[in-house]
Amino acid sequence: MMRIYNTLTQRKEEFHPLESGRVRMYVCGMTVYDYCHLGHARVLVAFDVITRYLRHRGYDVHYVRNITDIDDKILRRAEENGEPFSELTDRMIRAMHEDEARLGVLSPDEEPRATGHIEEIVAMIHRLIASGHAYEADNGDVYFAVESFPDYGKLSKKKLEDLVAGARVDVREAKRSPADFALWKAAPEGEVSWPSPWGDGRPGWHIECSAMSTKCLGDTFDIHGGGPDLLFPHHENEIAQSECATGHPFARTWMHAGAIRVDKEKMSKSLGNFFTIREILEKHPAEVVRYFLVSSHYRSQVDYSEDNLVEAGRSLTRLYHALRGVTPAKSDSVPETGHDRRFAEAMDDDFNTAGAMAVLHAVANEINQHRRDGEDLEARQSAAVLVRLGAVLGLMQQDPEAFFQADTGGELSAADIEAMIQARADARKARDFAEADRIRDELADKGIILDDSREGTTWRRG
RNA sequence: GGCGCGGUGGCAGAGUGGUUAUGCAGCGGACUGCAACUCCGUGUACGCCGGUUCGAUUCCGACCCGCGCCUCCA
């Protein structure tokens, strides 16, 4: 039995998909006007792990993650750059896909784009107007009438009257109520636009997700996820639009990832305290970044710091050390172990990856014990367990040597290092330990750590 | 102000009404030419104050502190 925390009900609930054995999931992806930062990585990795675990558990998962490729920020950035908006968005989408791939994030099954669904968006707005939930304003914009939806605020637990009282007043807007939000924005002459019954314009921010999720997954689906700052207003507005347009309940379970923080503050575009994925990957192996993200629960806040990433690297190193020099048995040949069960127990409880990670370390310890005792077969079987459980978290899929020796731009090539190791081996054979240690120190200065064993010496970049 | 989340050992980070999280760092031992890796062992942890209970870090209440959303942000 799986339990998932549902933002809508504010509690963990038993998870039962609408259709037995099949999970329909929609996650709000990126607005592509800049490179992805670590906060985006958190969401990407969190829902990647969720998808992997659901599949591991036997569900047929249909995972949709959208791309918002038209909005104010995109247009502004494109204008600053002096380029067509689609050139900007194409570039950022490519970059995003690169970042994802490096972090081991599997592609969603569908990746719909707002600009590819203008028809569906217009149709949905049309229905909302027809049913009295939206209206065309004098300035050509179309707004959602928040007061027409009694459930408004049910996700973010906000009261409409508080929102109205605190709403920002923009004199250019022609809203009936301050809390109303745009479904369609009239485009000024010369700006990117699509034709509509209300004149040329473009979609408001939230409507694309309602239109695309409904199109890809149906009126009602199982899981809707996204970053913490999407809860309000984005997701609240999606619910309003979708439930008013279709007359059916929208997503059943709402999942939100926790924020990444830097120096006790949320990492965000507006604060400017963000680190892009590619910046971080210049300094740390991608799997270490992933390990860092997965090592805390997806809903908790996480503090980004160099120290924390370094520690994650050490911890992951321990796991790979257990695998070093061991050829894992075929996973199929290793029946379910207590580790598999403990792992599943942790993951069944709202995807407790931190608990699952402890199991990985227990398996690593077991491998090391078998190796100490010369139990090769058992070691290989345990190694298979480590790799197969790691796969569910998107970890431990590299060859250990590849992990240890990944070229991080050091001055020494693998061949240089091997030559020095050979020289040291010769010195040791001649019992010239001063020379042997000199070589080892020289390598250590350049970030190369040697590990001696009965089978010989291996090296890694530390 | 409204709504919500959290305060766990040196650090990171799970969890539980009474029994070992786990990792990093530290310390002792084994292994090693010496290290590294690994193994074995080791540490007065649960913000504060009340309450419920045979027993609370775990439940309830108050308080203190931190954070998030309420505006574009994953």
Image: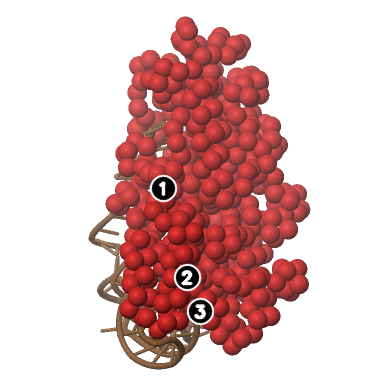
Residue visible at 74% across and 74% down in the picture: A335
Q: Are marks 1 and 2 in contact (CB under 8 Å)?
A: no
Q: Residue furthest front?
A: A430
Relative height, residue A72 to residue A404 (above, below): above
Q: Which amino acid is tagged 3?
A: Ser
Badge 3 sits on which subunit? A
The residue type indicated by label 1 comes to Glu
Q: Residue at x 46, y 39 (%)?
A: A36
Residue A326 locus on image (x, y percent): 61, 73
Q: CA distance from mark 3 to mark 1?
A: 31 Å
In depth, the one of B40 and A212 nearer the eye is B40
Residue A68 lies in quadrant: top right
Q: From the viewer's perspective, tell me whether residue A168 is left or right of residue A148.
A: left
The disc label shown at residue A422, or none:
2
Real-space Cα separation, disc 1 to disc 2, in angstroms? 31 Å
Question: Which residue carries the number 1 mark?
Answer: A282
Judging from the image, mark 1 belongs to the subunit labelled A
What colour do you see for chain A? Answer: red
| Residue situated furthest top in the rendering | A189
For image coordinates 63% across by 43% down, the residue present is A107
Please say if A234 is above or below A285.
above
Q: Are marks 1 and 2 on the same chain?
A: yes
* Pair 3/2: label in front: 2
Dot 1 or dot 2, earlier in sequence: 1
On the image, numbered disc 3 is attached to which residue? A453
Q: Secondary structure at mark 3?
A: strand
**The C terminus of chain A appears in which quarter of the rendering?**
bottom left
Where residue A92 appears, x then y in whole percent?
50, 32
